Structure formats: structure tokens, C-alpha cells
Image (cartoon, rainbow, N blue to C red):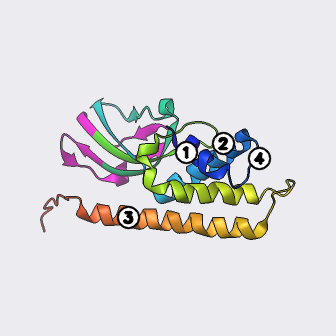
Amino acid sequence: MSVLAAVAGLTLPWVPDALETLHETQSRLALSEFLRQSLVLRRRLVLPVSDADQVTLGLVVQGLSPVRLLYVTLDGHPQDLSGMALEGDTLLLHGVTSGELVVEVAVTTSPTKGDVAEAELEPWLEPLMHGTLARLFALQPYEWYDPNQASFHRSAFYAGIEQARADDLRQAKRRPRRVRYAGL
């Protein structure tokens, strides 16, 4: 099951008068914002490089787009991120010759397409539901417009984003890190 279907199942009882397409549109926007701000969805890519100044990540095909470059290794050696940049679905390289490039990027979905498996974001379905409901209750021309409900759900959504970031930072502290001696 997809995240959008799961969130729609949670929000339909709250706003039953809204069309399913409206639920889906607002769910997509909430999902995109949640992933962009929390950085909890990551992809680890292994890419062969041979004297290229750029590499295509291939995330757009999956309906994802990179948000932030988290780490890069070349043949097992950590690389300085200051010489690299993300430009759409392309990683621009500087000073990389050839070898196996391992890239970890935080990704988000497009506001118009793309979805994620429910298992990847299961702990965050409730904040996503709140984000969707905040958007639905903020739609003025509809009879379910309620600024108080929209404000409540928006607060819960942003609290969920902060909780996701805190959990991610806690997990990052547990990951093993390599330190390379650079001399004096």
C-alpha cells in the first residue's frame, strides 16, 4: 500500500464531503513538505564514475527528487562535499577521477507525482494525516473550512516534522563514523 492511500484512508472520515482527488492532492503536498523538511527518506546509490564531471542519480524515474547531499564516498574513501553540488537529478563532481561512487541523498516526492511505500514512512503517517487535514480545513470556498481545525492540525504536522528530525539525528549519532587523519 502506498503512503498516499494510507493517508487518504485516515483523512476521509474527517472530511467526508471532499472528493478523493482533493484528498490525494493535499496528501501529496503534505508528503512533499514533510520529506523536504524532515529529511527522513533517504536513498543510497552506488554509481560507477569514469572521468566525468557529472553523474545522473536516476531518482526522477522513481518520482523522487534529491533534497540534500548527505555523504559521498569514492572507492570507500569519504569525499569532501564542498566540491559537489546537486542540480536537479544530477550530481556535479569536482576533482573525482574514476571509481565507485557511493552517494546518500535525502529525497522528497514531487508535489504532482510520485509516492512512497507505506512501510518506509509508517511511523510518520499521523503527522502526514495532520498535514493533509490542515490543508483541507484551510480551503476557504468549501463548507468544511475551519481555521481553528486547520491551525490545530498544522501545529501537529510541524511537531511531527520536528520529531522526525530529532529521531533522525538520534539515529545519526549511532551510525559509525570514520575519521581520517589529515596531519598537522
- Which of marks 1 and 2 precedes in the sequence? 1
Residue 22 horizontal side relative to residue 175, left or right = right
Q: Position of residue 15 (x, y in %)?
A: 73, 53
| Residues drawn in magenta | 72-101
Residue drawn at the location 48% of the way across and 32% of the way down: 62
Instruction: Provide residue 92's location: percent of width, then percent of height.
Output: 41, 40
Q: In x, y percent, where is residue 44?
A: 33, 42
| Tag 2: amino acid | Glu
Residue type at mark 3: give it.
Asp
The image shows residue 150, relative to residue 42, as above or below, that is below
| Residue designated by label 4 | 18
**Which numbered disc, 4 or 3, marks the residue that appears first in the sequence?**
4
* Residue at disc 4, secondary structure: loop
Which one is earlier in the sequence, the residue at label 1 or at label 4?
1
Query: In the image, what residue type sits under mark 1?
Result: Ala
Residue 29 visible at all: yes
Alpha carbon separation for disc pair 2 and 4: 10 Å
| Pointers 3 and 1 in contact (C-beta within 8 Å) | no
Are dots 2 and 4 in contact, CB under 8 Å?
no
Label ID, residue 45: none
Q: Earlier in the sequence, mark 2 or mark 3?
A: 2
Residue on which disc 1 sits? 6
Question: Per the image, is 92 magenta?
Answer: yes
